[in-house]
Amino acid sequence: MSHNNTAINQLLKPISRHDFESLAKKHHTGQKLRSATRWDQFVAMSMSQLSGRQSLRDIESNLESQQNKLYHIGAKPIAKSTLARINENQPCELYEQLFYKLLNRFKKQPNKHKFRFKNPLYSLDASAIDLSLELFPWARHRTDTANVKLSVGLNHGNYIPEFVAISDGNENDMIKGREFSFPKGSIVAFDKGYVDYQWFAELTNQGVSFVTRIRSKAVYKVKERRCVNKKLGLTKDQTIQFSSAHAKKRGVPELRLVGYIDKESGKKYEFLTNNFNLAARTIASIYKDRWQVELFFKAIKQNLKIKAFNGRSKNAVMTQIWIAMITYLLLAHARHSAKSGWTVQRILRVIQMNIFERKTLKSILNPSPRDNKKGQPQMRLIL
């Protein structure tokens, strides 16, 4: 019988221990760690993401019960007090940089979105992670709420978040959005919260296309009108120029305005883009597909541990969020072993039940059909 490593061993395999230890050495503060290492911390916290552990005591008990299997991934059980102290004091930047190292490896894999055009397609959005104001006063958002904001640029070819930033809940979405450097030739879809005329000019100069919705009170002049196929739900396809003093000062170029009516809801939309090459119907479909980033936020909030935290300091919260994002990357990478059409959410649920099983990931995520042997006596129900 062939030997197989545990599922978690195989899942963590893409992480280079050499790279991890180099980052751990770089991002260390205080005295040398004695009773546990940063790798022990990472394994403990990533296991809590994969197995749904709810507290530090829960994590400690789970590790102790599986300590003979931790040896094979170079880790050991870690006391809850030690884990709390490392989460509190050791810089979270280790996991931020580890996330991007992994991302650079996974980006090289082939990916393809559902549209015919070959340009990379991204959705840009931000979502608040709510916190208790009483427990996390440093994250105060308003007088009665606290949160941090997770900004993401999601690649539609592989549904991997290629651009990630965590910021103060009071920070405007545009601040982190403008820091993301999308590749030349790519297309980015975002909602009206990112409308900024100067940024529109910058994206156009960088060779990046965007698709968004126009604000209701925008002032513009129509430069050109094109015929549209109303059977496809299109109402207009125009070249426009924003004419307000605010827009002119920021150098916004001529843009394209596409009108569309959703046949199911009857709701009217007006999409704004700097792409004049794609069909008007495709522009509408791109914005509709922006919903994938909303599904991404829903999936990580429902399935990863970023709503209840095992520490109260900002560093402990950031550490947990970055490890959750690394866990999502590893699960997304495991898709090649899963059945066609499986989502990251479904993969996570299956791995939660098999995290310490000594089976190949392929056999866990791509199980063979059950034999339907009706003729066997043990399969019969005797009445």
Image (spheres, rainbow, N blue to C red):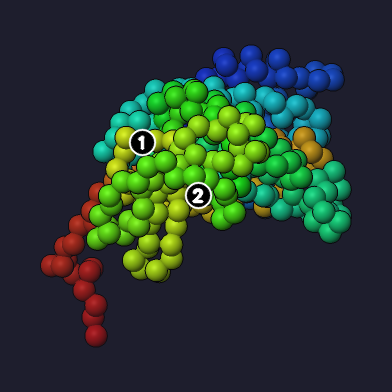
Q: Which residue is mark 2?
A: 213
Give coordinates of residue 212: x percent, y percent.
Answer: 49, 45
79 vs 203, left or right, is right
Quadrant assignment, res 266: bottom left
Q: Tag 2, which secondary structure?
A: strand
- Give the label on residue 108, or none: none
Give coordinates of residue 8: x percent, y percent.
Answer: 49, 37
Q: Residue at x 45, y 53 (%)?
A: 270
Q: Nearer the viewer, residue 57 or 329?
A: 329
Q: Tag 1, which secondary structure?
A: loop
Quadrant assignment, res 364: top left
Image quadrant occupied by the N terminus? top left
Q: Amino acid at mark 2?
A: Arg
Q: Which residue is mark 1?
A: 276
Q: Is residue 187 above or below residue 57?
A: above
Give coordinates of residue 24: x percent, y percent.
Answer: 68, 19
Q: Residue at x 32, y 35 (%)?
A: 277
